[in-house]
Amino acid sequence: MIAVDTSSWIAYLQGDEGPDTRALDDALERALVVLPPAVPAEIFSDPALDEAVGNLFRRVPVLELSPGYWERVGLLRAKVLAAKRRARLADALIAQSCLDHDVPLLTRDGDFHDFREVSGLLL
């Protein structure tokens, strides 16, 4: 199982080549893709979202939130901020979902490296 961040999804949907898009394509073929809950929210925020893309996202399983999730998100974000690193709220939501389920995150967004450094997030 692999969680996929919005940055890699956008690259994939635009036909960009890269290790992340190849890994996403392979994981989709093997039905191994899951979505952190913030990712569909980001994708469905696009006012020009294509119906086929929306249908694709409706078929991909979303990681469940476990008790204490919101507190853990805040504590994780505080840890990254205390290390004087960038910690956007959406990234903290995504990172904590992956940590809770022990699932690696596929992403192009370098900001997740800061979460990896303070929490052991698998990238």
Image (tube, helix red, strand yellow):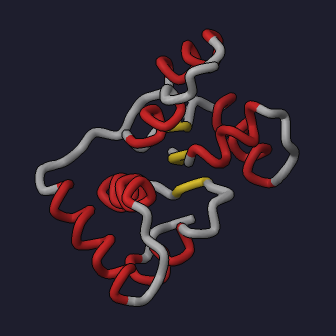
Residue 58 % position (x, y): 47, 18
Q: Residue at x 30, y 72 (%)?
A: 76
Residue 88 higher or lower than 58, as above or below: below
Residue 55, quarter of the rendered image = top right
- For this orientation, the residue located farthest to the bottom is 83
- For this orientation, the residue located farthest to the left is 67
Q: Nearer the viewer, residue 40 or 104?
A: 40
Q: Give left or right: position of 37 versus 47.
A: left
Residue 67 higher or lower than 79, as above or below: above
Residue 123 higher or lower than 48, as above or below: below
- For this orientation, the residue located farthest to the top is 51
Residue 102 seen in render: no
Residue 26, quarter of the rendered image = top right
Q: Residue at x 64, y 48 (%)?
A: 7
Residue 38 % position (x, y): 40, 42
Residue 21, quarter of the rendered image = top right
Residue 9 seen in render: yes
Residue 63 % position (x, y): 35, 40
Q: How many marks?
A: 0
- For this orientation, the residue located farthest to the right is 17
Q: Nearer the viewer, residue 77 or 32?
A: 77
Q: Give left or right: position of 67 versus 2.
A: left
Q: Residue at x 57, y 30 (%)?
A: 31
Residue 123 % position (x, y): 57, 65
Q: Give left or right: position of 107 versus 99.
A: right
Residue 29 higher or lower than 16, as above or below: above
